[in-house]
Amino acid sequence: MTVAKKIGTLSALVCAMLAVEFAHAEETFINPEWANSAWYLGAGVGRSRGTIDRQRLTDSFTANGASVTGFNTDERDTGYKLFVGKQLNRYLALELGYFDLGKFGFNATTSGNGVLNGEAGFRGANLDLLGQLPITERLSLLGRVGMNYAKTSTHFSGNRLAAVTAPDHSERKLNAKAGLGLEYKLSEALALRGEMERYRVNDAVGNRGDVDLLSVSLVYKLGRPAHSAPVYVPPAAVEAAPPAAVVAPLPPPAKAPEPTSEKASFSSEALFDFDKSTVKPDGRAALDDLLVKLQGMNTEVMVTVGHTDSVGSNDYNQKLSLRRAEAVKAYLVSKGVEASRVYTEGKGETQPMADNAKAEGRAKNRRVTVEVVGTRSTTK
């Protein structure tokens, strides 16, 4: 496969991934901290290409008194890989893998009815450092460097075996490898990769070259936290029991904890980057302050409500406001709040608190509110 064809194939994969990106742009991820530290498994398959050293074989025939009359090569095969990895952070991961790059061969004919057939296969293990550069929330550019420990097995047959050092031979060598590619996250746990990797190998008969693998892989992250988004249902009113006959005056009941409601509003700029729904470090600090203020309250219900300005379509703003409300909920749950007590709502642009015609008004309308209903014990 020529370089131009490889670039064309990779470009087609890029276009396909971008099309899927636009189709799923309304969905969001609410467990980014888990995804950036998870273990994962993966498997890939693709087209491999090796290079037969024709000149070296021709020189060997000549040294043995024969001239080459025909030379055919089979330099392409199917390769596959299996790997396990650990996400170190959002940008780096470490991968340990097993690969089989397939087999590559040639058929040579020489003067005097000479024939020599050869075949070489490559398989082994690799350890790579994987770099990931996010382009969007779902699409990332990949780059990898590492080492591969490959076993090379060669086999030759025919009546010109004098041109090679050994008919059957195997060798193990440690060499470098590198690669580039793209990763598209189908969900927080499942991703699709397209990569082009180059393995430096030895062919067990004195040659040192490269084998390229153009592959597509599926990656699955392990241990995804369970989450749910229950629908908020206000507590039902309790019917008052009919008054009982009073025989004697009763002592006044002990004062029950007083119900209370607290509400906080956060600007979207403080919580999120533009058009994103992942809580920023400054936003997490603001939510931590809210949780400190709630200490001592017996929390019954928390409701996170997202709001937007009027820029954009109603449908997009509605989905964006809900994604941001769910991201705030996910962070609160990660801090120990029971998931069953936190509800989410998205109001889109339907409840402005300022004039959307002005920039400062639109900034006030882009917000997430957190309302807490519970009780505080009071002492007199």
Image (tube, grey):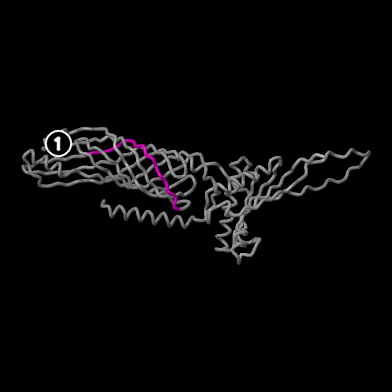
> Split into 4 quadrants, where in the image is the C terminus?
top right
Residue at position x 48%, y 51% from top?
137
Q: Is residue 127 magenta?
A: yes
Q: Position of residue 19 (x, y in %)?
A: 43, 57
Instruction: Give, as a three-letter code, the residue at label 1.
Output: Val
The image shows residue 96 at horizontal and vertical percentages of 38, 37
Q: Residue 295: percent from the left, percent from the top?
A: 68, 41
Q: In the image, 285: left or right of 259?
A: left
Highlighted range, magenta: 120-135
- Is 358 positioned to the left or the right of 239 in the image? left
Instruction: Tell which residue pokes out farthest to the right in this image.
Output: 248
* Residue ranking furthest to the bottom: 357
Which structural element holds mark 1? loop
Q: Between residue 129 and residue 214, name the one nearer to us.
A: 129
Q: Residues within 10 Å of mark 1 (few under 14, many from 20)?
A: some
The reply to whether the magenta stretch includes residue 142 is no
Kindly indicate the quadrant of the structure image that contains residue 353: bottom right
Nearer to the camera, 198 or 68? 198
Name the residue rendered at 42%, 56% in the picture: 18
What residue did someone put label 1 on?
A: 164
* Residue shown at 36% from the left, 43% from the top: 144
